[in-house]
Image (spheres, rainbow, N blue to C red):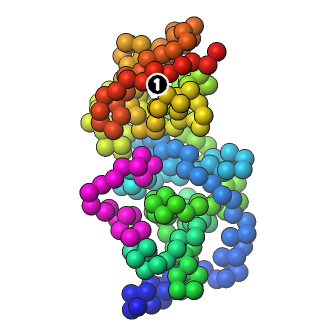
Amino acid sequence: MKLMNGLMLVATLLMPSFDVWAAQESASIETKVKTLLIDPSTQTPVVVLESIADKRALPIWIDVPEAKAIALELEHVKLPRPLTHDLIRNILQGLNATLQRVTITELRNNTYFALLSLAAKGQQLQIDSRPSDAIAVALRMKAPIFVSAQVLAKSKPLPAAGPARAEQTQKKLGVQAQDLTTELAKLFDSQQQKGVIVTDVLLGSAAMKAGLQRGDIITRVNDQSVSSAGELEATIQDAKAAAQIRLEVIKKGKPTTIMIDLPS
């Protein structure tokens, strides 16, 4: 009881005025985590949110520890001991608190701000948070992620993930991929040094039907080694007359083979 009262007191101190909070809630737009990228110009992780209604993207540059926490949950990796965001989830669940939503509320001086909206003991609580932490906790608690309309309107362009020709890869396979840099390998806890990492797989695509997943590392296509998104694109273009392509993939640290039926 003392811990719950303490949390409520902290939440009250951190809570914005009711009018500000109500305005943010009413003007917010539901999003989902689209993908994780590495900005090639800065080698900084980027979490990309996408509005559910109209597919507008909001890239947010974040730190490596939070990016790894998001990546682990996106890939459904179960660790033997709880990390920080797992601990936050466990504490909230232990106190019978419900995370109703998280909201990216502001962009001020190139810094994003977020709120956790909690329901606990009949009270509504608003907790100040970094967006990266809010997203990591929301994924663990299956809570919706909202963005204020004002923030979404100020969205920066997505960092370039590869050559323009990579659009053909996405169209044919339903895949977005990046060169496997040292930073990306660390982000996905991979020991692999060469290949192309899958950063997104489109719902219902040929790649998804074949079992390709975000975080998989493509090392060979039709017996040809690939070490960059450009090579992946060129190899797929060479195979455009084929009905099927063969991918050699590192999936959760283990090599496997995936056969993808190409759309006609």
> In which quadrant is the C terminus drawn?
top right
Residue 21: quadrant of the picture: bottom right
Find disc 1 in the rendering and name its residue: 229
Any part of residue 223 in sight? yes
Crowding near the residue tagged with mark 1, few <14, some 14–19, many ≥20 C-alpha atoms within 10 Å: many
- Image height of 146 relative to 124, above or below: above
Answer with left or right where residue 226 lies relative to residue 207. Answer: left
Q: Secondary structure at mark 1?
A: helix
At 58% from the left and 70% from the top, the residue drawn is 100
Height in image: 59 above or below 252? Answer: below
Residue 81 among magenta residues: yes
Which residue occupies 26% across, 57% down? Answer: 80
User: Residue type at mark 1?
Assistant: Ala
Residue drawn at x 68%, y 45% as measured from the top left: 55
| Residue 197 rendering spot, x and y as whole percentages | 42, 32
Estimate the x, y position of residue 140 in percent, counting from the top left: 45, 60
Magenta segment boundaries in residue numbering? 73-90
Find residue 84 and report its image quarter: bottom left
